[in-house]
Amino acid sequence: ADTLKSVTADKAYSSFETRIGPSSGKEFSDFSKIAFTIQTSDDQMLTVKADRCGGLMPGGAMADGAMMYAAVEANGVLHERAIAPDAELASVVDARAKANPAFMPYFHLQHDDYITLKERCCAAILAGSQPEGIATIQIAIDTLKLAETLKPLLEKQLI
């Protein structure tokens, strides 16, 4: 957040929605999909695109029934593109959903990741080291600071 120079929302891609909570009956608002470009104080450009409710990818292609899509570009170069679930995970998620229909769908989707997270953290505690591939508390704090900085700036552009 400290090196943020500017942020520009992609209005054509982004969707900010207001819904009624099923159990509370209260309104809540959030982005179902969003795209934006950050410019840092040293003029680096980072573009983020995320869709947590569909799988519609840039250009209008569908991501084969995916629940989530994300892409990250740095200075115009695609560095990461993720679609979840892929075909293999989708079959696992479907089987888990049939066995446990009352569970929220994302529980089935993220089950194996949570197991990996717990195993790595427990192993690191026993070894007295940092868990492999897991964000530190400082990274988490910095990420939340950036999110709290970006949210009102993006809302101002998109609402």
Image: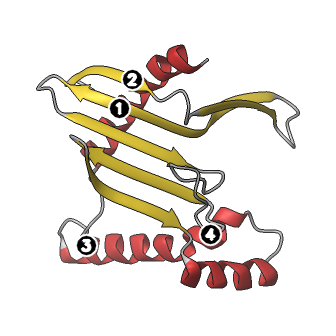
Identify the mark nearer the N-term, 4 or 3: 4
Identify the mark nearer the N-term, 2 or 4: 2
Residue sitting at the far top: 156
Quadrant of the image occupied by residue 31 = top right
Which element is circle 3 on? helix
Q: Which residue is mark 4?
A: 64
Dot 1 and dot 2 residues touching (CB under 8 Å): yes
Mark 3 closeness class: few <14, some 14–19, many ≥20 residues within 10 Å:
some
C-alpha gap between disc 1 and disc 2: 5 Å
Is residue 66 left or right of 39 when viewed as pictured? right
Identify the mark nearer the N-term, 1 or 2: 2
Is residue 52 left or right of 49 when viewed as pictured? right
Quadrant of the image occupied by residue 118 = bottom left
Quadrant housing the N terminus = top left
Q: Which residue is mark 2?
A: 8
Which element is circle 2 on? strand
Q: Which residue is mark 3?
A: 124
Horizontal and vertical percent position of residue 18? 75, 29
Residue sitting at the far left: 42
